[in-house]
Amino acid sequence: MSHVQLLARNLGIPNAAISIRNLNALAPFSGNTVFYAVSPRGKVVMKLASDMTTQEKELVEVRKRKEERVRVPTGKIDLKSVELAGLMELKASDSGRVCGPKAANLGQLRSLFPDKVAPGFVIPFGVFRKFMDLPMTGTDETFWDFLHATFAQTAKEMADGRSEEEIEVNVLSRLSRLQEAVKNAPLPSELIQKLRVRFREVFGDEMGQVPVFIRSDTNMEDLKEFTGAGLNLTVPNLLKEEDILQGIRNVWASPFRERSYRWRQKYLLNPENVYPSILILKSVNVDKSGVMITTGVVSSEPRDTTVAFNWGVGGAVDGQAAETYLLQYDNIDTLTIPAREPTFRSLPQQGGVEKSATHFGKPILSNQDRQQLRKLDHEIRSRLPGTPGVESDGPYDVELGLLNGSIWLFQVRPFVENKNARSTTYLHAMDPEPPKNLSISMSQKLTEQEQ
């Protein structure tokens, strides 16, 4: 359920976790080309490319094609809106208009589940666009002019027939320069004053007294056929005013990172029109956290629910060995993966992130926790589809936490899979139907049939 797993599933990339024993067994084959496939239920096939069957060769046949480039939708974006909006003022329909889908959907969630979403507010696209009209240090042009000139130069180099590698080196060099300039530019005093006012109104205290998360939220993420899981910058648990202001600058600079360019701008017809809004959310130091998918990921049963949790904050999303359950529709809870993460993270009141050692003496999710998650799953399935501005009917990818037994929602996005990869006959043939009512003793050696 980690971000990298969700991205792989979205893009149709075979992906499986392996043990150190597996890694050691593979080491002698380093440098060889191999065929690699992972079935919907997790069966793995790996063999030397020289041993591939005719069917396997056809599956991985390289087809050269012209890379499709897309245009960022900008028809409804409102760059004149520069007021800092509280979550309760936002609706899902504001996504792509004044802010990204993360904030807009969280605003919608706060109206649907007011006791389960932390307070927060948004710095809209328009504030970023206004900032970009300021002079860029070390040049005689604005940030916006420098950005436009960068991509204009890229287009010219492409038209001149320059190599893709050369073009990429040039554009990344200019974007790196722009990124550093944004990070080091002073914020307008008018914006700082608005931030101080909003902190008092939304969080009930002065800026510098309430720890917050600074989250990037662009107009180019979580699209119908693409998940933006883990691609944007999040700066966790900032307390001091100067750290918060620097966090804002860092998030504004993040679309110009190499990572962002390779994932998005490289394939866009109008790459300068990727705008970051910023979600400022009150920190919640949850006891346990993780991900809930409102479908059976391993069972392929849409009525089931999959949950993965760890102790502390940021559970399951960052490649952790999380405690994972299949909550079956017939009220049976099946533990599919035990927790094996030796540490967990917490959010101290003074800001920053602390890491502590944990134990495996008891389950992370109690029976009561799992019942709460089942109830939330039912509410999400029944309330989100058809809600104005929510374009997906499910399933949903939910990031959440538990604090003293109460649920906190951090994000809900569509759970997007690569349907072409999932429908491949070869992959499904790897998964024979398991025997009904199969029972395996954990205290006896497996028979050959059970293996």
Image: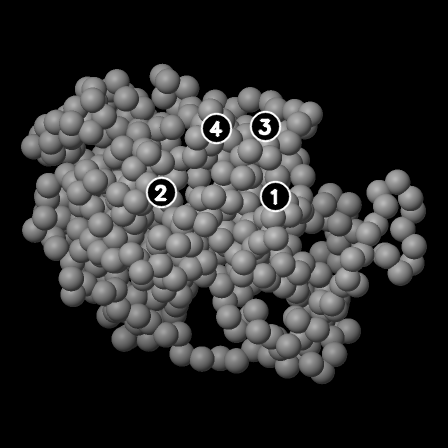
Where is residue 134 shown, x and y percent of the image? 10, 43
Q: CA distance from mark 1 to mark 4?
A: 18 Å
Where is residue 186 shown, x and y percent of the image? 16, 32
| Residue type, numbered disc 3 | Thr
Q: Give the vertical position of 200 relative to 54 (above or below).
A: above
Decide if residue 267 is in sight here. Answer: yes
Q: Which residue is mark 3?
A: 343
Q: What residue sits 39% from the left and 74% below the top?
A: 67
Q: Give the vertical position of 235 relative to 216 (above or below).
A: above
N-term-proximal mark, 2 vs 4: 2
Where is residue 255 shown, x and y percent of the image? 30, 50
Q: CA distance from mark 1 to mark 3?
A: 17 Å
- Tell me where residue 450 sits by quadrant: bottom right
| Residue type, numbered disc 4 | Gly
| Residue type, numbered disc 1 | Thr
| Front disc: 2 or 4 | 4
Tell me the element at label 2. Answer: loop
Where is residue 195 shown, x and y percent of the image? 15, 30
| Front disc: 1 or 2 | 1
Farthest residue, direction front: 330
Q: What residue sits 41% from the left and 48% below the top?
A: 379
| Residue type, numbered disc 2 | Leu
| Front disc: 1 or 4 | 4
Q: Which residue is mark 2?
A: 233
Q: CB of mark 1 within 8 Å of CB of mark 4?
A: no
Q: Which residue is mark 4?
A: 405
Q: Which residue is mark 1?
A: 324
Q: Is residue 79 left or right of residue 68?
A: left
Q: Is residue 12 left or right of residue 278?
A: right
Q: Is residue 282 left or right of residue 288?
A: left
